[in-house]
Image (cartoon, grey):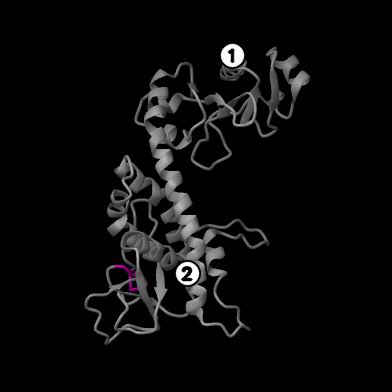
Amino acid sequence: MINVVKDFEIAKYVTHAGKFHADEIFGTILLEKLYKNIDIIRLPEVDMLNLEGKLVFDIGGGKFDHHQKGGNGERENGIRYAAFGLLWKEFGMEFLKSISAENIEDCYHMFDKNFVQFIDAGDNGQIPFENIDIKLETVSDIIEGFNPNWDEDIDSDVSFKDATDIARVIFDNKIHSVIAKCRAKRFVEEAIEKSEDGILVLDRFMPYQEFVLDSKNPKAPGILYAVFKSNRNGYNVRGIPVKLGSFENRKKLPAEWCGLRNEALQKITGVQTATFCHNAGFICVAETMDDAMMLAKLAVSQ
């Protein structure tokens, strides 16, 4: 439970007052996950205060702040640490152990890569936006949207607590997703080793793209397509992206297939149960595994 308090003496955790941001909100959630009951105070400044016995973050220029001159470190990829990242770096492993997560080392790094870094990058102004005339709403924007509006007379501590209620749901969903993804790594690595002719075959759908892209197996860079049972109907043939999140694939499906369905796709491919090929050329579908494999082999050869 998070208690936003006004009494400095009873507070064990300290962050800044005024407008709150996603980095200290999610940092607060992490601390709550570890220590259960959080008595936190939000202050405009902490200079000249006795902070002994209190954990201070996102203010004061200490271990868990990043506002001091030169910041407070950055990752190898250049993403600078904000409060959430600094707290995750310090307490992430302890938290994962506390929930008995499997593959703790993998989960620790994947949660940082897949979630924490995005929050940190947003707070540090490191997210590039396309030159378009619409406002792109990120998770950080949604969290910050809980701040009182300019014409509202609301205690921002109340809004801070409201924001943590939403952030807790997001945090729980992301950590459970990462833990599940890490459980898939072993199966994907086994499938990479068994792959032939640039085709990865999975017994069922599971997260695979990140593991294929990061795998040290010498077969991994040559994998062009993954074949797996669809969570709709049939079996998918999915192109491997050049990098995570990209719509550009190592090899696009044949251009003449793109946008075709059913009889038209069956006629041009000769595959009896082919049902769909996306017009962007990154995925196609057949009703049977054998026919999906046939589509994948055709795509590799063309």
- Inspect the image, locate mark 1, and give the three-letter code of the amino acid beneath it: Asp
Circle 2 SS class:
loop
- Magenta span: predominant SS is loop
Circle 1 SS class:
helix
Q: Evaluate whether residue 81 shows in this view.
A: no
Range covered by the magenta-colored residues: 64-70
**Would you identify the image quadrant in which residue 94 lies?**
bottom left
Report the side of 17 relative to 91 (left or right): right
User: What label does residue 21 carry, if any?
Assistant: 2
- Inspect the image, locate mark 2, and give the three-letter code of the amino acid beneath it: His
Categorize mark 1 by other alpha carbons within 10 Å: few (<14), some (14-19), many (20+). Answer: few
User: What label does residue 290 carry, if any?
Assistant: 1
Up the image or down, 79 lies above or below 162; here it is above
Residue lying at the far bottom in this picture: please name it.
48
Quarter of the image that includes the C terminus: top right
Residue at screen point 50% across, 36% down = 242
